[in-house]
Amino acid sequence: MTIKACEVVGPGNPYPFGVTDVNHVTDVNSANKCSKQNTTQNKNVAIYAPDCKQVFIHFFLPDTEELVAKVELVNRTGKVFHGKLSAVSSQWFYAIQGIQNDPRKGHDIDKNLLIDPYAKSLNRELVWQASLYNEQNPSFIPKAAVSIAKFDWQDLPKPNISLAQTILYEMHVKGFTQQFPNLTAQERGKYLGLANEHVIHHIKSLGVTSVQLMPVFSFMSEPRLQELGLSNYWGYNPINWFSPDPRYGHNDAVNELKTAIRELHRNNIEVILDVVFNHTAEGDKSGPTFSFKGFAEAEFYLADSDGFDTGSGHSFTNSYANYTGCGNTVNADSDYALQMIMDALRYWLTEMQVDGFRFDLAASLGRNGARFNRHSALFRAINQDPIISNAKLIAEPWDIGPEGYQLGNFPPTWVECNDKYRDSIRKFWRGDKGLVPEVASRILGSRDIFKKGRRSQVSSVNYITYHDGFTLDDLVSYEQRHNLANLEDNRDGHGSNFSSNYGVEGPTTDRAIIELRQRQKRNMLATLLFSQGIPHLLAGDEIGRSQNGNNNAYCQDNELSWLDWQLDSSAQSFLEFVQQLISLRKQYPVLQKCFLADDDYEHSEYHHHVNWIRQDGEPKQVDDWQNQENQCLGLVIADDDKNQHMLLLLNASGDPQKYTLPSAIERSLLLDTNLYEINSIDKETNNAEYYTQAPQSMSLWRLRS
């Protein structure tokens, strides 16, 4: 079969970036060794490459990666090389070669192929192989697909769940599905596993509204981890911001991920992506070049000082600023990186139909040079964008750079992961004293952080556990991290976990300890689900998942990280308890969003009223709040519109506490964490004037006046 040459037939356009369609023709004589008929297309190619003096695009066959065409983009507008190409096979893959003006010291990278930063699909994962990289072997770099197959969304709308009703459920694609029962080989550990009806049934029956997927951007494991026989399981090391990682795909990662998103939407479940725009896998200045560094290094990465040679526009004279702990920091204040981030967000929201994003180390995205600016160019661009501004935007509001802790300082349209909530609730239930005032603030939405009138009542993303830390079960089973499997001499991971083992480090057969641990787990999740703000659950906590005390399992792609779905009676019972908690939150809207008269960020025709009470039923006074020995809290939220009050009683002390119950025509004890099942509640309790809250437990009541 004769290969028909691909050639430049016109200057094309400098935008959009990447390889895009011009028109389509069917050419039965075109070169494709995999098919008798092949669709060829005219393509526009535009590569932003201010660091380059020449740019070539290489085309490859899909199976063998045999080179079939090499074309120079001879046209240039400003910093963009571009051209209109004819006879490009829809089945080809491609990579870019950039000839730099200033080849970096140490080795010549002119012959190294690069991943197009705007590639939408890669044919395989990127695995570090030093010999292939140093030899400039074209087989090292994954190749990008020329065309993406069409996908039928079946006209399904997005769930469009309000922030107040949102319940986040963080999961890892592989970890969640790898051991899930009754999945096929094509589904196990893959995007398609999330589309399986049994997987969706678990998510839906739990009651969460939004799955938050850990990174699915194409990524590479760090060379150091590979040398140790480990891998970057979490995926926070991207090589591309548009292409889903092929690891989780079976045949077509893009459309398989779309299938998962579509089927989750069919069941009214949102999909939130954990996105990494703050750094890439290219490491520090001496690190390898896969993509960004080969085209626009000086614009794309922050220097550790004003080290950019603005005269030439392509020289990078200083080392990288490392505000992420990963060797580099993306300069989101540059026109190029800002535009790419915006293009990527719009692509995922429109083409991939996701519902929002959780931004890893989001403080880096607000940096103008070294300083954080809540009015940065990227934040302003997002705020005015009609597509992105309407998505869910969740900030991890810190990085490790100067002024890196920015909780409460993101734009009003964002919500923020609240580590102060995590720490105070953990310490309170552990038994630490002097925390009642802070816990009261956390339960009512952390308005000391998210100021009234400036931020919404649901700005706080509340969580007890996240992927980076102890699981809920480990939080009540270990006081020390046990990370030796990470091969860093147990130095990695959080040192201050505010956890307790209640007498024994790790597993135990002591029934009293086991029962206390289970109750403390119930306490923390009940507090979480009954607090103002957006609750965040870590997948597996509802079934008692443990990582054996490893609080930084980022490199453990094995049974330690994968969810075990063989549930014993204890796990099944706890799952039912979590389902009950979520059901109660949904049943009583005031638990989702409390409108107070002095909280005017949003207009409401009615207001709720809150009253903090002592054990004797009287309102708390100033002296009560200053009592450092007190470990009890009572809260009444009055919903006059529905003629009902919600009562929360918390007792973190080791002694029973007798509460005088507020007067009401009707009382209903809805839940007590000291009781295993709702059926265990003595109905006579509802008629009592007093209630004794057991040690280290809490209860939720409905009162009708």
Image (spheres, rainbow, N blue to C red):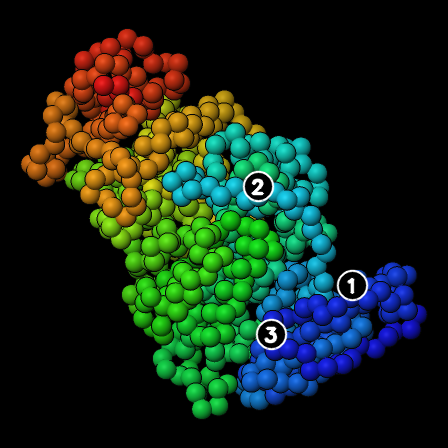
Q: Looking at the picture, which amino acid does disc 3 mark?
A: Tyr
Residue at 34%, 22% (x, y): give it: 671
Of 424 and 120, nearer the camera is: 120
Q: Is residue 24 above or below residue 317?
A: above
Q: Disc 1 and disc 3: Cα gap in Å? A: 23 Å
- Report whether 496 appears left or right of 298: left
Residue farthest left in this picture: 623
Question: Dot 2: few (<14), some (14–19), or many (≥20) neighbours within 10 Å?
Answer: many
**Residue 513 pos. (x, y %):** 35, 27
The mark lying in front, picked from 1 and 3, is: 3
Q: Earlier in the sequence, mark 3 or mark 2?
A: 3
What residue would you read off at disc 1? 91
The mark lying in front, picked from 3 and 2, is: 3
Residue farthest bottom in this picture: 311
Q: Secondary structure at mark 3?
A: loop
Of 3 and 324, nearer the camera is: 3
What residue would you read off at disc 2? 265
Labelled pair 3, 2 in contact (Cβ < 8 Å): no
Q: Looking at the picture, which amino acid does disc 2 mark?
A: His
**Residue 141 pos. (x, y %):** 66, 69
What residue would you read off at disc 3? 15
Q: Disc 3 and disc 2: Cα gap in Å? A: 32 Å
The mark lying in front, picked from 2 and 1, is: 2
- Give the mark count: 3
Q: Earlier in the sequence, mark 2 or mark 1?
A: 1
Question: Dot 1: few (<14), some (14–19), or many (≥20) neighbours within 10 Å?
Answer: many
